[in-house]
Amino acid sequence: MVEPDPAAARTITEHLIDLRLEVLVRSDGASALEALEGPPPDAVLCETVMPGIDGHTVLQAVIDRALPCPVLLMGAHVEVADVLEAWRSGAADFLPKPFSRRQLRDALRRAWARAASRAPARGGPRPCPPRRRPPPSPRPPPSTPGGRPCAPGRHKAPWRCPWRRSSSSASAS
């Protein structure tokens, strides 16, 4: 985690420890880049606005080094443009401060799930799954009194189409 504010770092560290995660805290972007030289972390949680090297530079360093960890950026004064820039740059998520333990947990789970779905399988990239065709419909499509079929998705249960009932009850009498 990269957080220049000691009070915020302490609070976020407590959240991460409560989630039973090991935490390595850095106070600036330069020391974070040094820490990335070692074994890759499971995730990087980084403040966007820092003196010297900012969070976007740390994110770009993770991407350039092809580290297999998601980067979550966080910030206190957030605008939509900042969030969009973070996502376009490759951030897994953006957390506006202050955030709760639950928000942090959910963001980490989403980031890890996305990273796992993008990770190549052992022995090379995963092939695309085969396209599946939908199973054939067991019932004919419903139709209106004029004999035209109803619009797709018009009824939650197409076999319960009111026009279908009226036409079948009329033919039964």
Image (cartoon, grey):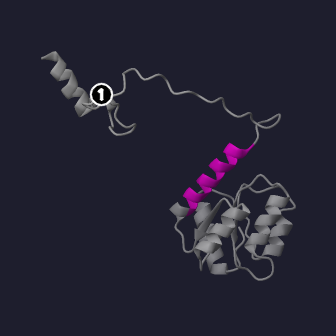
Span highlighted in magenta in the image = 104-119
Residue farthest toward the top in the current orientation of the protein: 172
Decide if residue 101 is on the left or right side of residue 3: left
The percent position of residue 145, horizontal first and vertical second, equals 24, 30
* Most foreground residue, 89 or 10: 89
Q: Nearer the viewer, residue 164 or 139?
A: 164
Placement of 14 over or under 41, stated as above or below: below
Position of residue 28 relative to residue 45, above or below, is below
Residue sitting farthest toward the bottom: 51
In this view, which residue lies farthest toward the front?
A: 146
The answer to whether residue 72 shows anywhere in this view is no
Q: Position of residue 47 (x, y in %)?
A: 68, 73
Asked where in the image residue 3 lies, by quadrant, the reply is: bottom right
For disc 1, the marked residue is: 147
Q: Secondary structure at mark 1?
A: loop
Q: Amino acid at mark 1?
A: Gly
Q: Residue at x 82, y 72 (%)?
A: 31
Residue 21 in view here:
yes
Judge by depth and name the residue closer to the eye, 54 or 157.
Answer: 157
Provide residue 120's location: percent of width, then percent of height.
Answer: 76, 40
Write the residue at 71% across / 58% down: 43
